[in-house]
Image (cartoon, rainbow, N blue to C red):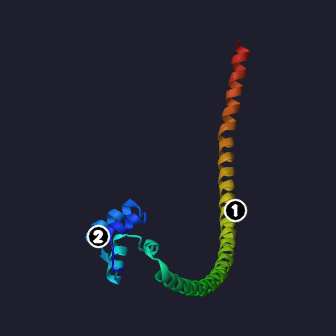
Amino acid sequence: MKRITVEMLRKHHACEGQVELFEETFPKGAPVTMRSLAKAQKVGLDVLWCERLLTGPASAEYKKVVRQASAEYKKVVKQASAEYKKVVRQASAECEKVTAQARAEYEKVEGQAWAEYKKVVRQASAEYEKVEGQAWAEYVKVTRPALVAALAQEKQEVDNE
């Protein structure tokens, strides 16, 4: 096969959207070259769909290459995945270690902060109670004589009635 055409795509039931895109990109058809393949991929054509155009020995040879490439791909990806997981486990362990250290330091500092807070609150509370007590004593000192005087006046008004 030297050229792929719109007619070939339709004959092999390519979807209409891809046929239209192919026709816009390659109005006279596409020569079977790496350059045409790259151009087709760049515009969004599903170039792997062209496997359906292969028959006989060409199809068998292509499938052989695909099997070998697929096996190599899987081997490389498996190794890369194992290395990735190893690195992630190490990074996670280091993160856990650093986080634990930070958490311990935080708890130490938090404990110190709470102790200082409680000390300041106790002091403020004692000062408040002292001032409040003095204010109450002054309040009583001022209001008791007024209460006694008011009650005494009340008694005289009742007696006078």
The spot of residue 144 in percent (x, y) is 70, 37
The spot of residue 132 in percent (x, y) is 66, 50
Q: Quadrant of the N terminus?
A: bottom left
Residue at the disc numbered 1: 122
Amino acid at dot 2? Thr
Looking at the image, residue 158 lies above or below residue 7: above
**2 or 68: nearer the viewer:** 2
Which residue is found at the position 38% from the left and 64% from the top?
A: 10
Looking at the image, residue 57 lies above or below residue 136: below
The spot of residue 60 in percent (x, y) is 51, 82
**43 or 123: nearer the viewer:** 43
Picture quarter containing residue 35? bottom left
Residue lying farthest to the top in this orientation: 161
Residue at the disc numbered 2: 25
**26 or 84: nearer the viewer:** 26
Q: Is 11 displayed left or right of 103 in the figure?
A: left
The spot of residue 55 in percent (x, y) is 47, 77
Q: Regarding mark 2 in the picture, which secondary structure is present there?
A: helix
Of the numbered discs 2 and 1, the one sitting upstream in the chain is 2
Picture quarter containing residue 104? bottom right
**109 or 50: nearer the viewer:** 50
Looking at the image, residue 6 lies above or below residue 108: above
State which mark lies toward you, 2 or 1.
2
Give the Cα separation between the discs numbered 2 and 1: 83 Å
Residue lying farthest to the left in this orientation: 28
Q: Quadrant of the C terminus?
A: top right
Amino acid at dot 1? Arg
Q: Regarding mark 1 in the picture, which secondary structure is present there?
A: helix
Q: Residues within 10 Å of mark 1 (few under 14, many from 20)?
A: few
Q: Is 11 displayed left or right of 61 in the figure?
A: left
Q: Is 156 displayed left or right of 2 in the figure?
A: right
